[in-house]
Image (cartoon, helix red, strand yellow):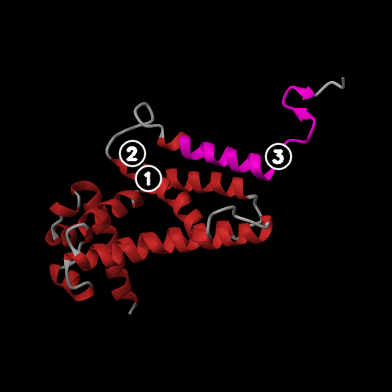
């Protein structure tokens, strides 16, 4: 059993590396098998097809990061610091290749209903988590204004998906300031959570008249 798990893990790692190198459309299961050092038959035995293999890669990568994010949101950090941490995670996920895996499989899902359903389930998990965070914020602050938790989850999550798309296209901060803009939202949250004392400003006490 341990040998089978090791083989499966090696195939998943090799598949991710191949996707990052050539993209989903150009993937070869034979090339993945060679990179993993296993017979081609092992890919079919463990995953059945290239599509199932790459969805397994996405599931592995996604679940690790979703668990990490859920643990962070369960912490006692203020919401604005949690947002900053989420931005740090975002940078890490770009560097690790997770975002590329997600975007490649998302694009594949546009013309394949089965892939679309699987990827949608993965993405939905993030928005469900954000809705839980919004609901806890409502209980803490007493109101979410005109928004439902699900609507706030959409407002919080969609900018990250958009940023991922443009960054992978090569539109860096000199063209579209996606990363800095996301971090500035954390500053807005800090202003809401830690408003300045009345009668004071950054320049010091307001003089009495």
Q: Compared to 28, does 205 lie above or below?
A: above
Instruction: List x then y, in percent, for residue 17.
Output: 26, 52
Q: Quadrant of residue 8?
A: bottom left
Q: CA distance from mark 1 to mark 2?
A: 9 Å
Please tell me which residue is depicted at 31% across the width and 66% down the height of the picture.
9
SS at badge 1:
helix
Circles 1 and 2, Cβ within 8 Å, touching? The answer is yes
* Separation of marks 1 and 3 at Cα, in angstroms: 33 Å
Secondary structure beneath dot 3 equals: loop
Q: Which stretch did the figure color magenta?
A: 181-205
Quarter in which the C terminus is drawn: top right
Query: Residue under circle 2?
Result: 167
Q: Tell me the residue at 13%/58% (across/down).
A: 28
Disc 3: which residue: 195
Q: CA distance from mark 2 to mark 3?
A: 33 Å
Q: Which mark is residue 188?
A: none
- Which residue occupies the extreme front position in the image? 146
Report if residue 135 is visible in the image.
yes
Marked residue nearer the N-terminal end (1 or 3): 1
Instruction: Residue 176: name its quadrant.
Output: top left
Q: What residue would you read off at disc 1?
A: 94
Give the residue drawn at x 50%, y 54%. Answer: 152
Residue 16 is inside the magenta segment: no
| Residue 10 seen by the camera | no
């Amino acid at each position: 059993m341990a040998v089978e798990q090791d083989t499966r893990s090696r195939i998943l790692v090799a598949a991710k590396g191949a996707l990052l190198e050539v993209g989903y459309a150009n993937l070869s299961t034979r090339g993945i098998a060679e990179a993993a050092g296993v017979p081609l038959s092992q890919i079919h035995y463990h995953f059945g097809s290239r599509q199932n293999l790459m969805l397994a890669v996405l599931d592995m990568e996604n679940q690790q990061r979703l668990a990490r994010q859920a643990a962070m949101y369960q912490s006692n950090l203020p919401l604005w610091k949690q947002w900053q941490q989420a931005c740090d995670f975002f940078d890490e996920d770009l560097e690790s290749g997770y975002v590329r895996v997600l975007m490649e499989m998302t694009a594949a899902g546009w013309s394949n209903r089965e892939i679309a359903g699987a990827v949608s389930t993965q993405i939905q998990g993030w928005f469900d988590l954000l809705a839980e965070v919004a609901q806890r914020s409502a209980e803490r602050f007493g109101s979410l204004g005109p928004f439902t938790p699900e609507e706030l989850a959409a407002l919080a999550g969609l900018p990250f998906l958009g940023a991922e798309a443009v960054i992978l296209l090569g539109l860096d901060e000199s063209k579209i300031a996606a990363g800095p803009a996301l971090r500035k939202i954390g500053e807005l949250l800090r202003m809401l959570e830690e408003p300045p004392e009345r009668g004071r400003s950054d320049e010091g006490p307001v003089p009495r008249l």
